[in-house]
Image: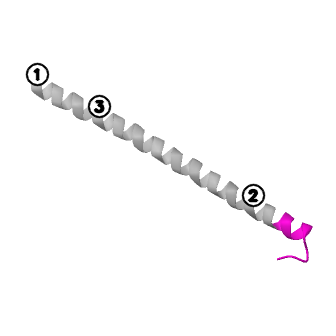
């Protein structure tokens, strides 16, 4: 009986840790996508400014 309680406790702990890890991964993916979008927008803005400052160069 004691071994069964240990097994159930370990499995429950593993499931809790797995849930926390998946939640953290989901938030990291969301933050990464936001950062990627910000980099793309900044690159586009900088490219437009560069083209505007030097109209003869491409």
- The residue lying at 79 percent from left, 66 percent from top is 47
- Where residue 19 sits, quadrant-wise, is top left
Tell me the distance, in whole angstroms, between the alpha carbons under discs 1 and 2: 60 Å
Q: Residues within 10 Å of mark 3 (few under 14, many from 20)?
A: few
Give the mark nearer the N terminus: 3 vs 2. Answer: 3
Q: Residues within 10 Å of mark 1 (few under 14, many from 20)?
A: few
- Residue 56 forms part of the magenta stretch: yes
- Where residue 13 sits, quadrant-wise, is top left
State yes or no: discs 1 and 2 in contact (Cβ < 8 Å): no
- Which residue in the protein does label 2 denote? 42
Image quarter in which the N terminus is found:
top left
Outermost residue toward the front?
57
Q: x, y percentage for residue 50?
A: 85, 66
13 shown above or below 39? above
Q: Which mark is residue 13?
A: 3
Depth check: 37 or 47 in front? 47
Q: Which mark is residue 2?
A: 1
Q: x, y percentage for residue 30?
A: 56, 50
Q: Callout 2: helix, strand or loop?
A: helix
- Where residue 15 sits, quadrant-wise, is top left
Q: Callout 3: helix, strand or loop?
A: helix
17 shown above or below 55? above
Q: x, y percentage for residue 34?
A: 63, 52
Tell me the distance, in whole angstroms, between the alpha carbons under discs 3 and 2: 43 Å
State yes or no: discs 3 and 2 in contact (Cβ < 8 Å): no
Q: Which mark is residue 44?
A: none
Q: x, y percentage for residue 54?
A: 90, 70
Question: What is the span of residues highlighted in magenta in the rendered image?
Answer: 48-58
Outermost residue toward the top?
2
């Amino acid at each position: 009986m004691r071994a069964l309680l240990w097994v159930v406790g370990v499995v429950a702990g593993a499931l809790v840790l797995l849930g926390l890890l998946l939640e953290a991964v989901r938030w990291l993916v969301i933050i990464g996508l936001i950062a990627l979008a910000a980099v793309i927008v900044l690159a586009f803005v900088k490219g437009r400014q560069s083209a505007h400052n030097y109209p003869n160069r491409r």
